[in-house]
Amino acid sequence: VEKGSEVGAHILSGAVIDPIGLDRLLPGWREDAACPLKTQVTEDRFYYLGPSGGIRLPNFVMPPLMNNHGNFVGSLGNVCRFLGAKAEELGVEIYPGFAATEVLYGDKGEVLGIATGDMGVGRDGQPKDSFTRGMELRGKYTLFAEGARGSLTKEIIARFGLDAGREPQKYGIGIKELWRIDPAKHQPGLVQHSFGWPLSSDTGGGSFLYHIEDNQVVVGFVVHLNYKNPTLSPFDEFQRFKTHPMVRDIFEGGKRLAYGARALTEGGWQSVPKLAFPGGALIGCGAGFMNVPRIKGSHNAVLSGIEAAEAAAKALEAGRDHDELADYEAGWRSGPIGADLKNVRNVKPLWSKLGTFLGIPLGGVDMWLNNKL
């Protein structure tokens, strides 16, 4: 069930993508002419910004997991469309334009499926001539991939107490724009990350600039939502960032093509709730699988979908249904998702507690030490 008009419609596109998930899901995707992911990262740059300039951090001081070489840059929305077509070729039924609005429960409290919302309802709440009743979609297992703070996911976490014994989830907001720029300024595969100005040292966040295909650039800005300044506006800070001397020339003569924003789950390793419950499981950002320092989560979303699906298939082969997918719950921390998140588990807490000038260096040291273990 996809609430957007098509698969990928609600994806905030333009990303650096770690191919580990795609490699496991579709080993031959690189040779598939239909795959839209063509541009590899050619150069990594990291900057600390001040009001009028910036300092480039040497790549050799960055923890190895921050290295983007071997990753790809491109439209995540187009990647989702590509994967959606592959799924349909295998017989998967996709229902675009339908939002899941209700969880269906059985007599024992187990999840039986979801119901979509009614369509053709007027502003007064009354049915119009085009009124169509929502559908009930039932299954032996239901996987919820609603992203950060999904309405049904919040209900399920509360109903089954999935967050018991975990740290509360932390959130950020990511704002992103897609530009087409002067071809003379375009450097396909260039990836640039920065922190500092215009944010103060006690406000977590940063910015990024990705040169993707077709003379397009993705520019984005992330603000951690535990900031204390009551007058701070993440959108306004983003617009200020684009005026910085080190980036503003890129946009001169260009055209903004699209823009959007989304919530981010930033709690990581300590805040991932219990994922399995009677009749289903949480996957993707709904499970809290974003890696904050890498600003990446799509690879873990794919991996979590694979692992949950494999656990469900194993359960179905054994004749089970509507119980807990214990294999999925037990396996993720010892697998590639767990390895990805555990190595950065202290970065966000250090940044939030100690600020930019002390928290980021200590977080970097911690990532180096975890890489050596």
Image (cartoon, rainbow, N blue to C red):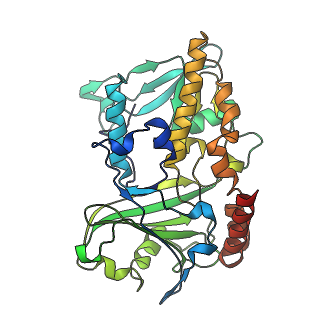
Give above or below for 207 relative to 312: below
Quadrant location of residue 347? bottom right
Give above or below for 321 relative to 159: above
- What residue is rendered at 30% in x and 72% in y? 186
- Residue 358 position within the rendered picture, expressed as x and y whole percent measured from the top left: 71, 76
Is residue 125 something that shows in the picture?
no
Give above or below for 178 relative to 197: above
Residue 97 located left or right of residue 255: right
Residue 291 located left or right of residue 95: right
Q: Residue furthest bottom?
A: 52
For the N terminus, the image quarter is: top left
- Residue 213 position within the rendered picture, expressed as x and y whole percent measured from the top left: 29, 60
- Residue 87 position within the rendered picture, expressed as x and y whole percent measured from the top left: 37, 30
Give above or below for 206 relative to 24: below
Pick the residue in front: 40 or 249: 40
Is residue 189 something that shows in the picture?
yes
- Residue 255 position within the rendered picture, expressed as x and y whole percent measured from the top left: 24, 70
